[in-house]
Amino acid sequence: DAKTTQPNSMESNEEEPVHLPCNHSTISGTDYIHWYRQLPSQGPEYVIHGLTSNVNNRMASLAIAEDRKSSTLILHRATLRDAAVYYCILRSRGSGNTGKLIFGQGTTLQVKP
Amino acid sequence: DAGVTQSPTHLIKTRGQHVTLRCSPISGHKSVSWYQQVLGQGPQFIFQYYEKEERGRGNFPDRFSARQFPNYSSELNVNALLLGDSALYLCASSLRDIGGYTFGSGTRLTVV
């Protein structure tokens, strides 16, 4: 299984953009890049996913490097409610997909008022 | 639409006992996965079921078992509970191979 590497923690000020990096140098061609976040005392929440092109949704943007060996989750204006652990995960698509998500330690994001 | 629902929300069991945790996926989702999250760590994959068949199994002992019913709901069973089984057990559902997973809020199991 391809692994991801994220910083343990990051800090941001409220209403400022946040860029959360993720390295995945062993990514394969069939791996999608998924981001989840987990707020205290809750289950993980799906944020966004992508394959090759940058993606935007109401929660965030995902910027994927041209060689796909890294990606960045972008929160355009951090709020206090965005304080959470953010996980970058590779999910393989195809008939062999077992649905297995491999969570690392993630990045703990602190948002300061 | 209702999200992924898990029951019970909290549970206290004694070592050696058996426990059954239940999960109802989002309507239309045929895939259900189970994860264990020990305090301070990321979730660890236990099982995935799709159309009532086991499609994936994580590195957990045979004391852990699961099944999926015709209505796509699922049960996770753990026998001979150990103190180390104390954790948050999460259920997630998805449309196979499409999009992301939706997680429930979990069942907090405490083994004493």
Image (tube, helix red, strand yellow):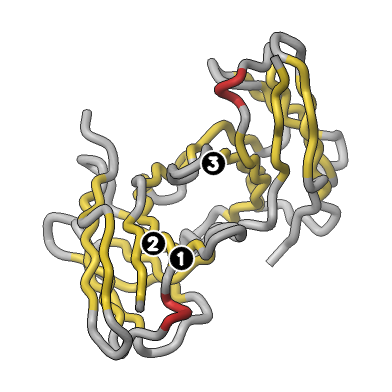
Q: CA distance from mark 2 to mark 3?
A: 14 Å
Q: Which residue is mark 3?
A: A38
How far across and down, in percent of the image, does residue B43 sit? 53, 59
Disc 1 element: strand
Residue B23 place in picture, x, y as percent: 24, 56
- Quadrant in the rendering for residue B47: bottom left
Q: Residue at x 74, y 56 (%)?
A: A28
Residue furthest to the front: B112
Q: Disc 3: which chain?
A: A
Q: Which residue is mark 2?
A: B89
Q: Which mark is residue A54?
A: none
Q: Which residue is mark 1?
A: B36
In three-dimensional space, the C-alpha distance between marks 3 and 1, rounded to whole angstroms, equals 14 Å
Q: CA distance from mark 1 to mark 2?
A: 5 Å
Q: Amino acid at mark 3?
A: Gln
Disc 1 and disc 2 on one polypeptide chain: yes
